[in-house]
Image (spheres, grey):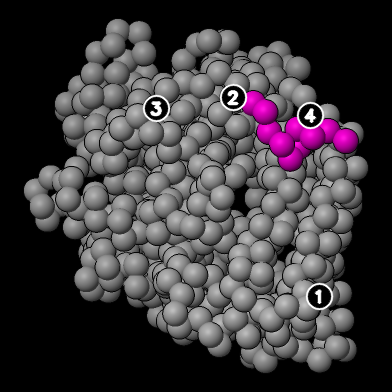
């Protein structure tokens, strides 16, 4: 048995990834799963009367070894997938679901937690909170069901684990297997930095010349800049075909049958628990509380966004026709003409900006903002990680170690698309306590040459800030129990810290200090900076519409009876919205990983906008002081939100910070939709 999987011996307690082999996982999983089951059985069968210590506190640490093992495994499965890891995922998923069902639906544990809850009045607030959450989670898992329904619930969860794993792997396969070579005579319109990135992508796939892959950091700027309309169409169709059976993997990566079964099983699960539908069950524990409140928010924003998109579509269509193209503006045209319009209206050329937005420069900005707001310091930590270009830092405050931060920033064929924040371990105070080891993963285009600069788009820079905002939630966490640590909050509250942090990217003082030319060190010229910031909402109608389409389709899928045909239901929702044909969903159903790669954002994709309502108002709290780095406001943010995790309901945490609930006006103003 490889003890490194659960007893980490690397610098500052990091795992030694260089000592881990894929063959180590299966035996370690068997061992740790058995140990976790035994620990929970000991709690459930304890003949002593239930107490906080012998029930609730014991449950907090019962699966510690299993969690440590799985944090390593799923990190590697996401950032560097291979056939062995995919096979292990398919093996682990139903077994973990079965284990979770046995624990969360054990009537003995349920009875013990209920007994502890009845005498919890004298406990401190955090202890009462984890009792409340444990009882809620057991109830929502089905612990109170009759034996027959518990058996059916366990079967549903096991099957969903298989389906969502297959969904993820199908999308990854389509993304991995597609590549579009682009000949030298078809590069018109592409800036030098993008051509260099395309050459790096081709070289990584063993090709000469340059190519487009389905990495978002590559395909989006290609669609924005390529003059070759036929190439744009080919690339775009491949991008939206992921998981549909029409992508690079063909029928073997068709996710639509999986989607149908996932929706059916989720509905059945909710009905077993006494809810009308999955959306009602899911939203019960969120800030939004009900599907009606979600739809009300999204509908308010849709009207303004749709109107702005219609205005922009007229302008872009005129530009298309001026180029001699007769016909309608298509989805593969929108980004191209929107970028040209942005250049015309704001005199912005992405090629002018790119030399100033290197990864190193923007990391400096991210860390500087964290220092000015939260007094955090970052020191490079040399450690053996999973790839040579993955990096780590010690995060300290006043000389005290706060956390370890790990960054995996570059795309690779084996990496899941998108960007995310996770934790190898979370902060808690049990025993000697532990600090978070937090991981940010992105898919930026790697440098053309080893050791050379990596150029980011403005959207990439925003992603870097966004994911580090999540990281602050882990780094600054200061709670007693792992189950309420860091980002363990309501789904529609979890995006508040990340989206709030994005605002500091847009501060002139931050750009002046850090957006420096990679060769000369000269700062981004003030007039170019101002034009860049002024262009921030240049295509707000498009970005808001594509997001809302996905959020409203997600809600429709999970509200009421599941659709007999998911794609037909998607089309119906978009038709009823009068959605512009040239603006497809940001995430079409066959590759909507937020919703179908797990339950996390299912009936919850709206949460980005719910959090945006709060982040706009939260940043206004800084602006109202006259100093966006106001120490007192930053301290209040830490004390009421960032350090508190899930130790209190999200509404209470927000009210403690702001003193009132926010309205949608700040969001509309921030997006330029008023």
Viewed as shown, does residue 415 lie left or right of 288? right
> Magenta segment: does it hold 4?
yes
Q: Tell me the residue that label 2 is attached to.
A: 11
Q: CA distance from mark 3 to mark 4?
A: 27 Å
Q: Say what secondary structure mark 3 lies in.
A: strand
State if disc 2 and disc 4 touch (CB < 8 Å). no
| Prevailing secondary structure class for the magenta stretch in the rendered image | loop
Q: Earlier in the sequence, mark 3 or mark 2?
A: 2
Q: Earlier in the sequence, mark 3 or mark 4?
A: 4
Q: Tell me the residue that label 1 is attached to.
A: 45
Q: CA distance from mark 1 to mark 3?
A: 47 Å
Q: CA distance from mark 4 to mark 2?
A: 15 Å
Q: Earlier in the sequence, mark 1 or mark 3?
A: 1
Residue 426's place in the image compared with 647, above or below, is above
Can residue 229 be seen by looking at this rendering? no
Extent of the magenta region: 1-10
Q: Tell me the residue that label 4 is attached to.
A: 20
Q: CA distance from mark 4 to mark 1?
A: 36 Å
Q: Where residue 91 sits in the image (x, y, percent)? A: 89, 52
């Amino acid at each position: 048995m490889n003890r490194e999987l659960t007893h980490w011996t690397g610098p500052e307690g990091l795992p030694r990834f260089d000592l881990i082999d894929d063959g180590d996982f299966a035996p370690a999983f068997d061992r740790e799963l058995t140990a976790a089951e035994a620990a929970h059985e000991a709690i459930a069968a304890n003949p002593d009367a239930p107490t906080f210590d012998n029930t609730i506190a014991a449950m907090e640490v019962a699966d510690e070894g299993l969690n440590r093992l799985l944090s390593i495994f799923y990190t590697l499965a996401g950032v560097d997938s291979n056939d062995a890891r995919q096979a292990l995922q398919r093996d682990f998923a139903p077994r973990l679901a079965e284990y979770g069902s046995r624990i969360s639906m054990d009537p003995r544990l349920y009875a013990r937690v209920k007994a502890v809850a009845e005498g919890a009045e004298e406990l401190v607030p955090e202890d009462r909170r984890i009792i409340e959450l444990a009882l809620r989670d057991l109830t929502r898992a089905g612990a109170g069901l009759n034996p027959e329904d518990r058996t059916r619930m366990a079967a549903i969860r096991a099957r969903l684990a298989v389906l969502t794993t297959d969904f993820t792997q199908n999308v990854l396969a389509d993304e991995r297997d597609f590549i579009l070579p682009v000949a030298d005579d078809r590069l018109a319109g592409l800036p030098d930095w993008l051509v260099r990135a395309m050459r790096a992508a081709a070289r990584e796939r063993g090709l000469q010349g340059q190519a487009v892959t389905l990495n978002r950091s590559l395909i989006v700027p290609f669609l924005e800049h390529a003059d070759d309309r036929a190439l744009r169409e080919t690339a775009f169709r491949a991008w939206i075909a992921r998981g549909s059976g029409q992508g690079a993997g063909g029928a073997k990566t068709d996710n639509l049958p999986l989607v149908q079964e996932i929706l059916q099983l989720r509905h059945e699960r909710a009905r077993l628990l006494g809810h009308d539908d999955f959306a009602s069950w899911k939203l019960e524990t969120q800030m939004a509380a009900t599907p009606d409140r979600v739809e009300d928010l999204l509908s308010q924003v849709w009207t303004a966004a749709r109107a702005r998109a219609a205005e922009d579509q007229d302008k872009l269509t005129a530009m298309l026709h001026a180029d001699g193209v007769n016909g309608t503006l298509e989805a593969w045209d929108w980004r191209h003409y929107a970028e040209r319009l942005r250049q015309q209206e704001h005199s912005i050329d992405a090629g002018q900006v790119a030399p100033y937005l290197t990864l190193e420069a923007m990391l400096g900005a991210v860390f500087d903002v964290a220092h000015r707001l939260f007094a955090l310091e970052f020191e490079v930590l040399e450690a053996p990680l999973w790839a040579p270009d993955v990096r780590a830092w010690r995060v300290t405050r006043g000389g005290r170690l706060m956390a370890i931060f790990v960054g995996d920033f570059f795309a690779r064929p084996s990496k899941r698309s998108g960007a995310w924040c996770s934790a190898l371990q979370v902060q808690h105070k049990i025993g000697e306590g532990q600090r978070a080891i937090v991981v940010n993963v992105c898919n930026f285009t790697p440098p053309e040459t080893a050791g050379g600069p990596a150029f980011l788009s403005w959207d990439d820079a925003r992603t870097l800030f966004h994911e580090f905002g999540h990281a602050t939630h882990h780094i600054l966490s200061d709670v007693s129990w792992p189950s309420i640590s860091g980002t363990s909050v309501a789904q529609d509250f979890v995006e508040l810290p990340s989206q709030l942090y994005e605002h500091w990217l847009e501060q002139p003082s931050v750009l002046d200090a850090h957006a420096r030319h990679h060769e000369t060190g000269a700062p981004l010229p003030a007039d170019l900076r101002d034009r860049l910031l002024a262009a921030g909402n240049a295509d707000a109608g498009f970005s808001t519409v594509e997001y809302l389409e996905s959020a409203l389709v997600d809600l429709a899928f999970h509200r009421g009876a599941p659709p007999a045909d998911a794609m037909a239901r998607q089309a119906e929702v978009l038709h009823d919205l009068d959605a512009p044909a040239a603006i497809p969903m940001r995430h079409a159903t066959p590759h909507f990983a937020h919703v179908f790669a797990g339950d996390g954002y299912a009936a919850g994709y709206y949460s980005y906008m719910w959090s945006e309502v709060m982040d706009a108002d939260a940043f206004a709290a800084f602006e109202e002081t006259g100093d966006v780095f106001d120490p007192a406001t930053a301290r209040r943010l830490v004390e009421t939100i960032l350090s508190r995790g899930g130790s209190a309901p999200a509404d209470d945490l927000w009210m403690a910070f702001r003193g009132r609930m926010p309205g949608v006006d700040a969001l509309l103003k921030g997006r330029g939709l008023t």
